[in-house]
Amino acid sequence: VQLVESGGGSVQPGGSLKLSCVASGFTFSWYDLRWYRQAPGKERELVATIRITGGNTYADSVKGRFTISRDNAKNTMYLQMNSLKPEDTAVYYCNVKYSTVDWWGQGTQVTVSS
């Protein structure tokens, strides 16, 4: 299993970024997928989940601002982040639980600062 995130960067408050996660090594369309983030000195937290049944869920802190999506034909998951706030600054990771094991990408840094 391999997960590769991209799309992070530095943006001013109120700006937008779109993260991507390209997956390989498993049947992508069969699995729920997740975005997590970890800010300096804090625990990793779940940001959003996209389920194969079609239901998406979000942390309260990002509801209405972030949108998770996937393209099964491209084995890619996305996180559209709008109205970014300084508290969104973190390393963002994609995640899949495959064969009872949690798999992670290397992460992509998002920095929101004026």
Image: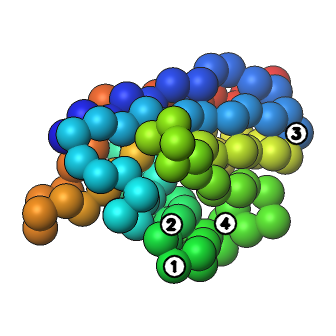
Q: Which residue is mark 1?
A: 53
> Can you say whether 29 is above or below 92 in the image?
below
Q: Which secondary structure, mark 1?
A: loop
Q: CA distance from mark 2 to mark 1?
A: 11 Å
Query: SS for tag 4?
Result: loop
- Left or right: 6 as drawn, with respect to 84: left
Disc 4 and disc 3 in contact, CB within 8 angstroms? no
The tag on residue 14 is 3
Which of the two discs, 4 and 3, labels the residue nearer the N terminus?
Answer: 3
| Residue 106 placement: quadrant | top left
Q: Which residue is mark 4?
A: 61
The percent coordinates of residue 72 (x first, y second) are 51, 49
Q: How many numbered marks, from 0 up?
A: 4
In the picture as drawn, the residue positioned furthest to the front comes out as: 73
The residues bearing labels 3 and 2 have C-alpha atoms spaced at a distance of: 23 Å
Give residue 42's position: percent from left, percent from top.
Answer: 38, 52
Measuring from the top left, give residue 111's x and y in whole percent: 62, 28
Disc 3, disc 2: CB below 8 Å? Answer: no
In this rendering, position of residue 100 left or right of residue 77: left
Q: Residue at x 80, y 35 (%)?
A: 16
Residue to which mark 2 is pinned: 49
Label 4 to label 3: alpha-carbon separation = 15 Å
